[in-house]
Each structure stands twice: as C-alpha cells, then as structure tokens.
Image: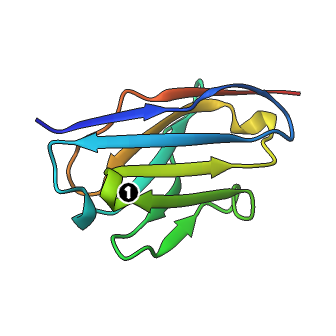
C-alpha cells in the first residue's frame, strides 16, 4: 500500500522559513518525480515545484528563488525548503509521486503578515 505523509507545516511570520517533508512508503520511490502542490482557500490546487528522478527541478514563477525542492532516495523522502515566506504562500501543501495518483494528506502552511 502506497503512503505519502507530509510534515513540517506550521505558522510563521512573513520572511520566515519552513521545511516540508514528504515521506513515502510502499513504492519504489527513486523512479518517480516528486511534485509539491498547494491549495489556498477558494483556489485551485497549483504546482509549486517538481524534481525529477535525476534531480532536475522546475518551479512556479511565484516561488523561484525562494523555494528549493530536493530528495533523498535513501530515505524515501522529498523536501521543500521555503524561505522568505509571504502571506500569499498560505495554503495546504501536498506532495505526490508523478503518474501514480497517490497524494499525501497535506500540511497546512500559514504565513502571517
């Protein structure tokens, strides 16, 4: 059974940092790209960042230069380092392994102004 568990969310002031983790089990983690998405209240879920199985990355324009996606295949874990957070980054953040249809339960990130 595939399971993805996000953690690391919380409440932070604008300009602060958080590091999200996505722990995977029940799947060959290393062969999949990892995507981080977010969904703010009343908005559609949007792609934040993605990292391929070889470490190639891509970011939404809104987070470029502030967020860094990474992975540790030995730990079956993906990460999203978020710096210089803004109130507009407030959302529930989800991870997924591309093409699998599996999603975590999400972790809330709230950035206060």
Left or right, residue 90 beside residue 50: right
Left or right, residue 25 beside residue 73: left
Q: Residue at x 34, y 51 (%)?
A: 75
Residue 61 in sight: yes
Left or right, residue 102 beside residue 112: left
Location of residue 102 in the rendering, given as x and y in whole percent from the top left corner? 24, 41
Quarter of the rendering containing residue 66: bottom right
Location of residue 70 in the rendering, given as x and y in whole percent from the top left corner? 50, 60
Tell me: residue 36, above or below residue 73: above
Q: Residue at x 70, y 39 (%)?
A: 89
Location of residue 52 in the rendering, given as x and y in whole percent from the top left corner? 38, 70
Q: Residue at x 20, y 51 (%)?
A: 100
Left or right, residue 44 beside residue 67: left
**Camera-side residue of 9 and 41:** 9
Label count reads 1
Quarter of the rendering containing residue 87: top right
| Residue positioned most to the front | 74
Quadrant, the N terminus: top left
Q: Residue at x 75, y 37 (%)?
A: 88
Location of residue 71 in the rendering, given as x and y in whole percent from the top left corner? 43, 59
Quadrant, the C terminus: top right
Residue behind mark 1: 34
Determine the secondary structure under disc 1: strand
Coloration of the structure image: rainbow
**Camera-side residue of 38 and 42:** 38
Other residues around mark 1 within 10 Å, as few (<14) / some (14–19) / many (≥20): many
Residue 40 in sight: no
């Amino acid at each position: 059974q595939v399971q993805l568990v996000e953690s690391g969310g919380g409440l932070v002031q604008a300009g602060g940092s958080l590091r999200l983790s996505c722990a995977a089990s029940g799947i060959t983690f290393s062969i999949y790209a990892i995507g981080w998405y977010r969904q703010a209240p009343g908005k559609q879920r949007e792609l934040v960042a993605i990292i391929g199985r070889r470490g190639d990355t891509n970011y939404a324009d809104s987070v470029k230069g502030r967020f860094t996606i990474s992975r540790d295949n030995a730990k079956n874990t993906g990460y999203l380092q978020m710096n210089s957070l803004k109130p507009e980054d407030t959302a529930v953040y989800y991870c997924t392994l591309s093409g699998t249809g599996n999603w975590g339960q999400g972790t809330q990130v709230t950035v206060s102004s």
